[in-house]
C-alpha cells in the first residue's frame, strides 16, 4: 500500500524565487508587487540627492507621482523624465509605470 501523507503537494522542489513568482502570478499581484518594489527602491534608482528631497512616492494608474521639496530638483527631474523612466524599467520591468508626475 502506497500512502502519500501530502496528497496535494508537488513532488519536485522549486527554488523560493520561482515559487514566489508563481504565487504572485496565481493571485494576479505581480504589478502591485513591482509597484511596491519601485517605491521602496526609489533612492537606489535616482540617487541620494534626489531621494533626500523626495517627501513621497506612489503609483496610481501606471503613473508615478513624486512629491519633491526642492524646485530645482523638480525641474531637473522633469527635464530627465525619459531617462528616469528607462531606469525604472531596468529595475522593475516594462509596463509598470508609463508616466512620471512631479508634485
Image (spheres, rainbow, N blue to C red):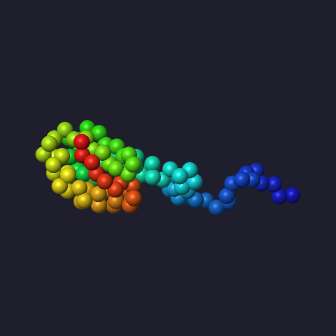
Q: Percent from the top left, x then y, of residue 90? A: 33, 61
Quadrant where the C terminus sits is top left
Q: Position of residue 28 (x, y in %)?
A: 53, 52
Which quarter of the figure has residue 94?
bottom left
Q: Of all residues shown, which one is farthest toward the right?
A: 1
Which residue sits at x=20%, y=51%?
A: 77
The correct choice, above or below, for 54 with respect to 19 in the image is above
Residue 40 shows up from this direction: no
Farthest-out residue, left = 72
Above or below, 9 relative to 57: below
Q: Relative to residue 18, is residue 41 drawn left or right?
A: left
Q: Splitting the image into 4 quarters, where does residue 72 fall? A: top left
Quadrant of image for the N terminus: bottom right
Residue 99: x and y in percent read: 31, 54
Toward the viewer: 89 or 65? 65
Query: In front: 83, or 50?
Result: 83
Q: Position of residue 11 (x, y in %)?
A: 68, 60
Task: Name the residue rendered at 23%, 55% in the picture.
Answer: 81
Kindly identify the residue that appears in the image at 76 percent across and 50 percent down: 5
Amino acid at each position: 500500500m502506497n500512502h502519500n501523507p501530502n496528497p496535494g503537494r508537488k513532488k519536485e522542489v522549486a527554488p523560493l524565487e520561482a515559487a514566489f513568482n508563481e504565487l504572485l502570478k496565481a493571485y494576479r499581484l505581480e504589478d502591485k508587487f513591482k509597484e511596491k518594489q519601485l517605491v521602496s527602491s526609489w533612492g537606489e534608482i535616482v540617487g541620494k540627492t534626489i531621494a533626500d528631497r523626495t517627501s513621497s512616492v506612489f503609483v496610481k494608474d501606471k503613473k508615478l507621482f513624486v512629491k519633491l521639496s526642492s524646485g530645482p530638483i523638480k525641474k531637473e527631474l522633469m527635464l530627465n523624465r525619459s531617462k528616469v523612466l528607462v531606469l525604472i524599467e531596468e529595475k522593475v520591468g516594462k509596463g509598470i509605470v508609463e508616466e512620471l508626475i512631479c508634485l
